[in-house]
Image (tube, rainbow, N blue to C red):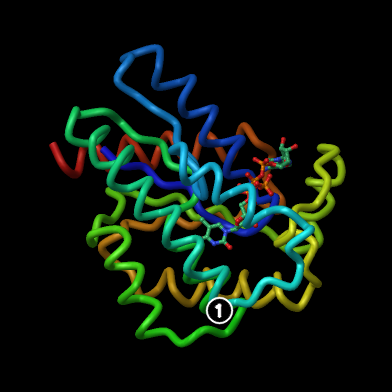
Amino acid sequence: MFILFEGPEGSGKTTMALRLLQHTKRGTDRVTYTREPGGQQVSEAIRKVLLNPVHAGMSPLAEFFLFQAARAEFVQKTLVPLLDAKHEVIQDRYSLSTMAYQIAGRGLPVAPCLSAIELATGGLIPDITFLLMCSYENGKARQLAAGKSPDRLEAEDASFHRKIIQGYRNFANLLPDWNIVTIETDHFPEDVVFNRILLALQAHHSDIS
Ligand code: T5A
């Protein structure tokens, strides 16, 4: 099973994905947490280039193709083998991030970008997607409170991040097969958000069994 966590900066993806990993591990050792960009040796090297603030002037197209290069390697070498081995994969970001950041945020053209994503992923989509949403201000405040110094994309201005938030909402409506569960996290503590995730997973399991 392929479980995806998506959302804007500071919405709690990594926190919830790792909580789900700990929770699931109690029942099976066939569960793996992976992240994008990264999750494979070459992809982690590309991640360093993409997130390094030294590359602040990178062109949107170069950024787009680096994300797809990291993704293609990750999907072929890590994700597909894990799913073939019947692992539960808890994935932190995937191609919905490209739709929000590079298409909605950077303004790259939709159709050719979606074709390139299809090529990079082989059309593989998640079984269920948790889209964790929060306001720009709240996400930023959470990252500051966590002591995280901004990477190249996080350091972009508020208008870029607001386009991403709207992009997530727009693309989520276009992807019915992704089984997207949208959770607004602004006014809910971590425990409440996690319980909603567990309930949605239980409902999904009973739907497919
Ligand atoms: N990117 C990625 C693209 O542009 N295109 C792509 O195709 C892909 C795959 C990745 C960057 O690359 C971009 C997007 C990103 O800019 P990253 O380091 O992986 O960089 O960054 P993020 O995934 O954005 O990590 P963040 O730390 O910014 O966000 P998270 O994971 O959403 O937040 P998390 O879990 O670390 O939580 C942050 C803090 O908030 C608290 C947590 O305890 C933590 O302290 N928190 C809450 N506080 C209150 N209430 C809640 N409900 C909370 N949930 C969490």
Counting from the top left corner in percent of width and height, residue 24 is at: 39, 22
Please name the residue shown 65% across and 77% down the image.
Answer: 163
- Residue 156 appears at what percent x and percent y? 77, 68
153 left or right of 158? left
* Callout 1 amino acid: Ala
Q: Secondary structure at mark 1?
A: helix
How crowded pointer 1 is (Cα within 10 Å; few <14, some 14-19, many 20+) is rated as: many
Residue 130: image location, x then y, percent: 45, 50
Quadrant in the picture for residue 27: top left
User: Where is residue 153, by image quadrant?
Assistant: bottom right
Q: Which residue lies at the image location 28% right of the left edge and 46% below the top edge?
A: 76
User: In the figure, 9 relative to 77: above or below?
Assistant: below
Q: Which residue is mark 1?
A: 104
Q: Quadrant of residue 107?
A: bottom right
**Horizontal and vertical percent for residue 144?**
86, 46
Please say if 143 is above or below 171.
Answer: above
Please tell me which residue is depicted at 72% across the width and 53% down the height of the picture: 52
Q: Where the C terminus falls, by quadrant?
A: top left
